[in-house]
Structure formats: C-alpha cells, structure tokens
Amino acid sequence: MSEASVFTRILEGEIPSEIIAETDRAFAIRDIAPKAPIHLLVIPKTEQYRDVVSLADGDPSLLAELVALARRVATEAGADDFRLVFNTGPGAGQTVFHVHGHVLAGDLTEGSLVG
Ligand code: AMP
C-alpha cells in the first residue's frame, strides 16, 4: 500500500486543516495556496479514484455528491456562481492523485486557472 494522500492525512487528523463541510462520503477544505478570493476543495473520503475520469467511471453518484457539496460550500462562502475545476493528469497541473474538485469564486477576471 502506498503512502496515504495529503487529503487522507487531513481527514485522519494527521495534517492540520479545518474540514469546513462534509457528507458521509465527501468533505471540503480551504486550499492552502488560494488562486482566487474563494478557493475550496471538495474531496471524496476514499482515495480509490485518482482523477475525475476514474471517479465518473467507478462511482458516478459519488461524483454527483461532490458537485452538490461544491454548490453548498460555495453558497456558504457567499458565492452564487463558481468555477469547479478538476485538473486531470500531471500535464494539466494535477499534483495530488486523490481526486478533488477546486471550487473557485470571487473575482475570477484573471482566469484563475489552477495548477
Ligand atoms: P492539484 O494541483 O489539482 O492536484 O491540486 C492540489 C491542491 O491541493 C493544490 O491547489 C494545493 O494548494 C492543495 N493542497 C496541497 N496541500 C494542501 C493542504 N495541506 N491543505 C490544503 N490544500 C492543500
């Protein structure tokens, strides 16, 4: 078994971070290096899926749960509109291979591409 991902270690309390919302199968935190005024991450509790393509193939209802959690945390942060980004593969800037969605909101005029 390879080492637990940074997000699993946060979930297990090994790395400090505030869990700002959760469901049975997903949780949300603030990105440590925000690229927008609001920059949150929505993450399945399992690290079984490395990216959004494998998540959509393996458990589409969990992907739908992540999208709903993104809507909820954006609303709670005061945003009606938001961008939901899944970097997919190293060439697209993915650095953590435990699928997660970036929830970006606020002033996005700079583009706010993450990665
Ligand atoms: P990606 O590059 O799409 O794989 O996104 C990984 C994201 O995780 C980056 O935006 C990082 O800033 C973020 N990140 C890494 N470590 C932490 C941490 N300990 N707490 C919160 N966010 C983190």
Image: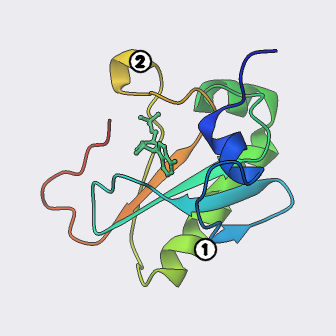
Q: Indicate which disc residue 72 carries.
A: 1
> Which quadrant: the C terminus?
top left
Q: Is residue 3 left or right of residue 34?
A: right
Give the residue drawn at x 72%, y 41%.
8
Front residue of 89 and 61 = 89
Q: Residues within 10 Å of mark 1 (few under 14, many from 20)?
A: some
Q: Secondary structure at mark 2?
A: helix
The one of 7 and 85 positioned closer to us in this rendering: 7
How far apart marks 1 and 2 lie (CA) works out to 28 Å
N-terminal of the pair, mark 1 or mark 2, is 1
Please, is residue 112 above or below residue 70 in the view?
above
Type of amino acid at the residue the image marks with label 2: Pro
Q: Position of residue 81 (x, y in %)?
A: 39, 72
Above or below, comparing residue 26 to residue 71 in the picture: above
Image coordinates of residue 38 in percent, x first then y, are: 36, 68
Q: What colour scheme does the image use?
A: rainbow
Lateral position of residue 17 relative to residue 22, left or right: left
The three-letter amino acid code for the residue at tag 1 is Arg
In the image, 7 versus 114, the foreground residue is 7
Residue 29, picture quadrant: bottom right
- Residue drawn at (60%, 67%) of the image: 18
Residue 29 placement, left or right of 106:
right
